[in-house]
Image (spheres, helix red, strand yellow):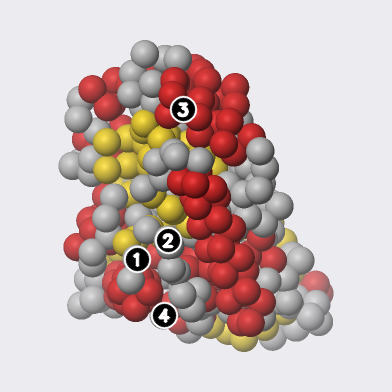
Amino acid sequence: MDLSSLPTPCALVDEARVAHNIERMAAQMRRLGVALRPHVKTAKSLPVAERQRAAGARGITVSTLKEAEQFFAAGFDDILYAVGIVPGKLAQVRALRERGCKLKVIVDSLPAAQAVAAAGHPFEVLIEIDTDDHRAGVKPEEARLLDIGRALHEGGAVLAGVMTHAGASYELHDPEALAAMAEQERARCVRAAERLRAAGLPCPIVSVGSTPTALSARRLDGVTEVRAGVYVFHDLVMLNVGVCNADEIALSVLATVIGHQDEKGWVLTDAGWMAMSRDRGTQAQPVDYGYGAVCDEAGRLIDGLVMSGANQEHGIVGWRDGHVDATLAQRFPLGTRLRILPNHACATAAQFPHYEVIGRDGALTRWERFGGW
Ligand SMILES: Cc1ncc(COP(=O)(O)O)c(C=O)c1O
């Protein structure tokens, strides 16, 4: 493998690792007997989504209507837009649906449900359920769950189901706690579906998921589909959660050493926060990797070496425990190339217009990606 032709910083993807991660999640879903509707917001890249579909994924999840537009244009027609819909976006959703896209939206309030139902189009809508006090959603036992369901069903929309995302799972790192969180996500979302059905309302879809809960679930009775996203690349946050190994992290930033500060034990690179993002997701986790974990050019992790600081276009590399090591300058002289593993793959990937992909045979290719809204 020769990376010398690549400009730095660039986003490097290991195709074999992506394939492994996709197959690992697909196998887990087969074992649990549920469909996988991957969240494509991590890679925002057609070649990645095509590989997920080839491995059995059914439909996709998106975080922006731009993703819906782009993936629909590329032949993905079963799409869940998993961010609460507002009236101002309904015209774009409707236009996509009238072109044949089975685009579904989510609501978690009565005003939103009433607005969607009154919009004069049979929008397919899922109710967002809060199963972990993490973010948005209606609690499964709340009275307004049925009010929202009725407002949709009786108001002209199609009540397609319920969905939840146990984002609180990112704060865990114990396998038993993760399995318990997956069970809580499952049980509370299924409970919401049962309440709707008991009230005579339809609820065909029960959609759950995050990468930690998807990989930790032991049973998913009553669930019809799982949405997981970051698993295609994994990252240091997932490493800390304990749902991947370092050699499953498929995205890194290729950087070049541009200088040193020997008395501080610093190696300076051309990958600052503009390349890695400002995401410090490992800060509160068992291992704080700073802005990233450092690997050699071949991708071998250098245990204990991290990107401890970041300016816009400068990265500072040093030992995680902060000890000053003047020999780093000899070990990594000017021009040395390093790979930096990201804290949060979605955020780091978003800094780049495309991926430089190391194929299974070591040859380089390029996968386009997009950003924006
Ligand atoms: C609504 C929703 N579903 C699914 C996911 C996928 O989670 P993960 O990236 O942990 O797989 C996310 C991620 O933020 C999300 O917001």
Q: Pointer 3: what residue?
A: 152
Mark 2 or 4, closer to the camera: 2
**Quadrant in which the N terminus appears:** bottom left
Q: Give the secondary structure at mark 2.
A: loop
Q: Give the secondary structure at mark 3.
A: helix
Q: Pointer 1: what residue?
A: 34
Q: Please, is residue 184 above or below residue 333 in the view?
A: above
- Residue at 68 percent across and 52 percent down: it is 134
Percent coordinates x, y for residue 305 in the rendering: 65, 79
Mark 4–mark 1 CB contact (< 8 Å): no
Q: Pointer 2: what residue?
A: 223
Percent coordinates x, y for residue 65 in the rendering: 40, 32
**CA neighbours of label 3 inside 10 A, class few (<14), some (14 to 19), many (20+):** many
Q: Amino acid at mark 3?
A: Leu
Which numbered marker is on residue 298? 4
Marks 2 and 1, how far apart in space?
A: 7 Å
Kindly indicate the quadrant of the structure image that contains residue 20: bottom left
Horizontal arrangement in the rendering, residue 209 relative to residue 185 (left or right): left
Mark 3 or 1, closer to the camera: 3
